[in-house]
Amino acid sequence: MNTTLAYKPQLDAVLSRLRLLYEQRAQDRVFASMQVPTRAMAEFRQRHREGECAYPDPAERIAFWDALLRERAAVEDDSVPSAYLSEFDQGLYGGLLGGEVRFLCHLDNGWISSMVFPLLRDWTEFDRLRFDESSEWFRRYVRQLKIFVAGAAGKFGISHFILIDSLNFLFELLGATRTYEELLDHPHQVRRAIEFALDVNVRVQNIFFQHVPLLAGGTCSNMVQWMPGRIVSESVDPFHMTSVDYFEQWGREPVERMLAQFDGGVVHIHGNGRHLLPAVRSVRGLKAVYLADDQGFPLAFDVLGELKAVIGDLPVLVEVDFERFRLALQQHRLVGGVFYHVKQAPSVDAANRCMEQVRAYRV
């Protein structure tokens, strides 16, 4: 392929391995990214405070990603370096429709994320909603895309960012509690909003792909590193607190319609949503599942055999601390067909020694 990125010297080999995983031809292998200490993260934590903050300067944000990913260039893992537009990971969608966007600084991962206050007091205001390309948030979105693409060129990629469609979009309009109530009280209005959400999300993601070039014919991803085609990052979070029947009634069709607009998508499932896995795994167009960890539930790594048995050959991604991963690797206890996001490796050298074993590992 001869694809190059300055911050991933062995990119071709990594992409070849990832193709095996996402083409479901690697059930006997394991894959990993390694989180290592960086000066960029230490400096971010010194300069910022946890909690609410203002919309940041995009030039400063791409400089942060550049510094972080440059330091990681020596790590010989299965990651593909990419910057994440965390500023637009939720609040953009409501902001485009006139909502009040708030930002939060996260010291654990260097993100500055966004949320929006509910847009509607009642359904009488729904018909006034418009996707406004002259709005402040549309201009900010396009400007940040251009700044990120220019800043990343030749060095690292730009990750896709989360969709806010289906009931996630209703959360933006009404808030979470009212959304669940409206499923019972005004299902017709809910379906109108879901249809509107599909249009808004497709437009937002098409703008992303218009500005962000594919890497070797694929999409960079904070969830799955890289995957062939134009891949979107879907969310079924609102259904984590519902029965599977609610997902089948309200979630499956919008998700499948969205994924059909592109070359498929990936989804994350939180600890309280694992009961959805038998249904979610059969969603048309789904390419991989990221199993997130949450308080009050077993770590996905600890019950991975059970979860993988439900998910089948669909690629799975989980998080695990370095020492626990290293021990399982040495004891030959790792589940195959899985990408492991390994946290808190003590050094680049330790990470690279571990990756030698990862590449040689066979289930």
Image (cartoon, rainbow, N blue to C red):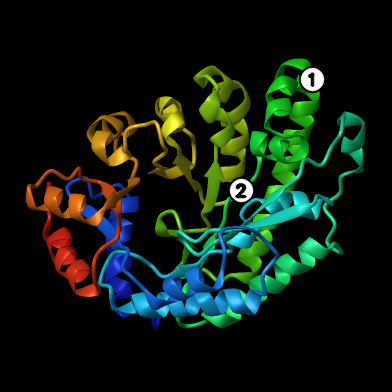
Q: Is residue 20 above or below residue 259?
A: below
Q: Quadrant of residue 137?
A: bottom right
Picture coordinates of residue 76, whole percent (x, y): 25, 72
Q: Is residue 218 above or below residue 168?
A: below
SS at mark 1 in the image = loop
Quadrant assignment for the N terminus: bottom left
Q: Which residue is mark 2?
A: 163
Taking 10 as reference, is 101 left or right?
right
Picture coordinates of residue 17, whole percent (x, y): 27, 61
Counting residues from the start of the chain, the first of labels 2 and 1 encountered is 2
Tell me the amino acid under the disc marked 2: Leu
Q: Is residue 324 above or below residue 48?
A: above
* Front in this rendered view, residue 10 or 237: 237
Q: Is residue 282 visible to the viewer in this orientation of the structure?
A: no
Q: Which residue is mark 1?
A: 186
- Residue at 50 percent across and 21 percent down: it is 244
* Front in this rendered view, residue 208 or 318: 318
Return the mark for residue 122.
Answer: none
Assess disc 1: are there few (<14), some (14-19) or many (≥20) residues with their C-alpha within 10 Å of its C-alpha: few
> How far apart, in angstroms, are the residues tagged by discs 2 and 1?
24 Å
Assess disc 2: are there few (<14), some (14-19) or many (≥20) residues with their C-alpha within 10 Å of its C-alpha: many
Tell me the amino acid under the disc marked 1: His
- Residue at 67 percent across and 70 percent down: it is 56
